[in-house]
Image: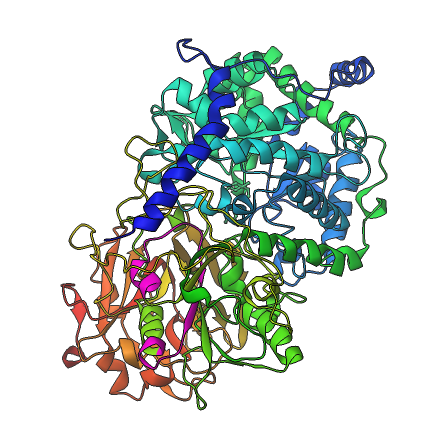
Amino acid sequence: MKLSKITLLSSSLILLATGCSVELSDKINTKESKPWAPIKSEVKTDPVIEAKVSKLLSSMTLEQKVAQMIQPEIRDITEEDMRKYGFGSYLNGGGAFPKNNKHSTPQDWIELAETMYQASIDDSVDGSAIPTMWGTDAVHGHNNVIGATLFPHNIGLGAANNPELMTKIAQITATEVMVTGIDWVFAPTVATVRNDRWGRTYEGYSEDPEIVKLYASAVVKGLQGSADEDFLGDDRVISTVKHFVGDGGTQDGDDQGDNRASEHDLYKLHAQGYVSGLAAGAQSVMASFNSWNGEKIHGSHYLLTEVLKEKMGFDGFVVGDWNGHGQVKGCSNESCPQAVNAGLDIFMVPTDAWKPLYENTIKQVKNNTISIARIDDAVKRILRVKFRAGLFDKPSPAKRMFSGKTALIGSDEHRKVARQAVQESLVLLKNKANLLPLSPKLNILVAGDGADNIGKQSGGWSITWQGTGNTNKDFPGGTSIYAGIEQQVSKAGGTAILSVDGSFEEKPDVAVVVFGEEPYAEGQGDIEHLYFESDNKKSLALLKQFKQQGIPVVSVFITGRPMWVNAEINASDAFVAAWLPGSEGQGIADVILANANNEIQNDFTGKLSFSWPKDAMQTEVNRFDENYDPLFPYGFGLTYGDKDILTDTLDETINIPAGSVKSDDKVSEIFQNSIKQPWSLWLYSGEKEIAVYANAHQLAELNYRTVDKLVQEDAFKISLTGSEKPSNSQASGVMIKHVASTAHDLGESVSENSRLQFSVSLANRTDGDVYLSTYCSADKTCGSSINISSYLNKLPVSDWQTFSIDLTCFSKKGMDFSKAVIPFEFSSKGKVELSIADIVITDNTEVSATISCGAM
Ligand code: BGC
Ligand code: BGC
């Protein structure tokens, strides 16, 4: 590869960057074995508050104290539970909504907040009147709420490198959160991300602590206000710096894995967000799922107590992560004195584990496994934050400053700031012959599966936890990238035509192709290498097709991490890393299009806060590495003033371990960890149907619950109780259908060897007939069903097995895979209890237990 200009440019950037880091390295005495230093929080101890805390604490029973430490999830508690136990806090997980309804209105959110609050201060049953607080993951805007402003994910914000903008974004997020009556936000994530295989790479601002440190305080202040002025005033929420500590530095980038950094690196690389976030007054810290040198942090007395509380001097509370305590050695979700003893103050305990956990914790205090002093310390911390946040004096959630002011959710003013963030986050990697900016008077073809897809451009943590299963209608007020281009082009007299598959009648002047990763969250986004292949190289084919026709091509790459896309870069004249821009897709047009007078509207200002790999296996290439040799270095980003950089062709040799290239395998993923585009998951029972987006649902006799196969919630379990009179009962089951209930052409992934394949784990032998069906019309008149009961019942109980059936079995009986509306339906009238995962159409013939149609 000849990359002389880039190489030159990178070395000067490295020099520049080295200059910036001196300050940080100088402060740390590398020879000292314990690097942690006391942090002076801007929020000072207030003797008046301390007196109130002590007084209240002395009046509390052990049961009331432990209840402060229990944080259940909205799907697992009722108003009556809140009245009876008086939990100190509660949360909604990703994609958890009031009434389990994705389309809950802000009013529904407030009602739930008000109900829970009133139940918490009702002392008629538990004798306690301490207000509860509601925590939520507003990680890129108030992302669980339909219509909220969705900002770019943190990776894009890192590229913008603008701390003032971060404070504004955080303040807007606080405002939209408060409209729904919520008190507390689980953000910012201050992970310094070292290995881009990690599924949470996009939740980090950078691979280097510099921006992380700058941003942590900026975001904390935007959420909570500044200590000297508006700290936790009526217009602010409590913030959480997470996940303490080292989540971004695990071996191989494994989510929830083991960080083996030295203590010095743990501090210097991974703790800098806490150094500045705590100084800015963050009131809560979330313990991380990961381990440090083999020990889970939820159980680490050293890190939670000695380092964070004693050495750094943190006086707020430590909240656990989603049943994270259950992963501590010797613990379960229902019992974990180790975590309390280590210094955890609040158990985040979704599922029905909260009740045994509450009871066990009380018992463990009574039998001295946990000291009452430790409980008192935890509760003091919780109460201290509640007093600081004014929770005892504030009106109830429905009556607060922003409550119910629904016009604030996704307001024009808020969206304008998000749009600015999009503009600033874009990084220009290639601009051959200065193709960009494009004149808005041109005839522009906008292609690719990301062109008109707000869900895809928003990534994970967007309405649903995984960000999947959404359509543009789930983002009212938002704008797709195509729509943004179209608005400006049609105003200027050009034309912008949407053609996802790239076909056209009239040859366009230029094609803008929007493509990239599908949404994912947490461990489900962990990958083996950085070779971009999730679209089976369809976008690359599209880019090449335009090139061959002599149409200049602009690539807009949607991604949660830098990826090895040399072939795509070669096939593009201009290449923009757009990250996960969120709901305001116009921000892209604002930069790549010139104005009507052909002048630059906004130059590119975004710079890589993550090094860009030269090779698919260069998964861990970071600024300041020895022998640092990325394709594009940290800090890289072209502007319109840069002429013709990257004129040479990049090396396209695919260098990944044998067996891990999937592109020539015809696999069409339907459900792989989570539901894939363009599909959606449904439960049905007779005529009744509900869409699945939560981790548990019930419909008539059918129960659905997500379970873990290899990673968190990559499978689902269904239980059908069956009916006493099977002949009269109606079938129930799960079905996967097209999001818009229209026909989808699976033809191209279907060969004569193709199979419908999935993993299954039987909990019990099934009782009654079980059908597997595929349909080519939404009313199920076109398609076919196959009775698979006898095959299923031959499988061993409880092990995961691969179940595979020739597609011809369906097509012979009337299924047309070029018009698939429901490619998978699993149903029965009988008694069934099993788990399903990995639903694909594949032509892999290696599965031994394949049912061929001859056997039918
Ligand atoms: C999911 C969890 C996930 C959580 C994050 C939930 O809806 O079911 O597994 O950890 O969201 O908030
Ligand atoms: C995630 C956290 C999140 C929590 C609550 C967990 O799965 O790791 O980042 O705050 O769920 O939703």
Give yes or no for residue 147 being in the magenta stretch: no
When asked about the image quadrant of residue 85, the answer is top right
When asked about the image quadrant of residue 216, the answer is top right
Query: Which residue is located at x 57 percent, y 62 percent?
Result: 591
Return the x and y of residue 165 as percentages of the image width and height. 66, 44
Up the image or down, 336 lies above or below 612; here it is: above
Give yes or no for residue 560 being in the magenta stretch: yes
Return the x and y of residue 780 as percentages of the image width and height. 43, 84
Query: Which residue is located at x 35 percent, y 77 percent?
Result: 773
Query: Which residue is located at x 58 percent, y 52 percent?
Result: 424
Up the image or down, 329 lies above or below 368; here it is: below
Whether residue 288 is visible: no
Would residue 313 appear left or right of 497 to someone viewing this image?
A: right
Residue 340 or residue 431, whichever sits in front: 431
Residue 220 or residue 164, whichever sits in front: 164
Would residue 104 appear left or right of 250 to someone viewing this image?
A: right
Would residue 192 appear left or right of 824 to someone viewing this image?
A: right
Position of the C terminus, as image quadrant, is bottom left
Q: What stretch of residues is rendered in magenta?
A: 546-570
Return the x and y of residue 695 as percentages of the image width and height. 50, 53
